[in-house]
Image (cartoon, rainbow, N blue to C red):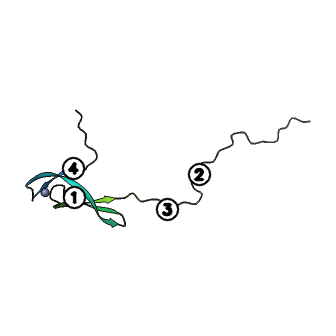
Amino acid sequence: MQRQFDKLRASELYCPRCGTARPVRERLLLVLPQGELYEYRCAMCGESLGTREMRMPQTPAVTAGGGAKRPRIHGKPFIGGGDGT
Ligand SMILES: [Zn+2]
């Protein structure tokens, strides 16, 4: 048996209406400019148990011609050789 905690995620919360810990349902409550607000509801009775704000990583502005990988020609620059006299 393997027990793992995936992230810091509340899978069960105490529900005052049920009087015991219940599995919760995550529900998108609000979309904020910087993220999303989720609401936890009791999966049994639907009581609201709390909210959580999920911050979104700021998406970088589109840079024009920034990070395109260019194939680089590898080689020595031609410097005029002096082999003639
Ligand atoms: Zn409940």
Q: 10 Å neighbourhood of mark 3: few (<14), some, or many (≥20)?
A: few
Q: Are marks 1 and 2 in contact (CB under 8 Å)?
A: no
Look at 79% across and 42% down and name the residue there: 79
At label 4, which amino acid type do we have? Ser
Viewer-nearest of labels 3 and 4?
4
At label 3, which amino acid type do we have? Ala
Look at 59% across and 51% down and name the residue there: 68
Vertical relation: 25 (above or below) 30: above
Viewer-nearest of labels 1 and 3?
1
Vertical relation: 24 (above or below) 76: below
Q: Residue 37 vs residue 66: left or right?
A: left
Which residue matches tag 3?
A: 61
Which residue matches tag 1?
A: 40
Q: 10 Å neighbourhood of mark 1: few (<14), some, or many (≥20)?
A: many
Vertical relation: 77 (above or below) 31: above
Q: Are marks 1 and 4 in contact (CB under 8 Å)?
A: no
| Secondary structure state at the residue bearing disc 4 | loop
Q: Which quarter of the figure has residue 85?
A: top right
Q: Which quarter of the figure has residue 44?
A: bottom left
Look at 33% across and 65% down and name the residue there: 31
Of the image marks 4 and 2, the number of the one nearer the N terminus: 4
Label 1 and label 3: CA atoms lie apart by: 32 Å
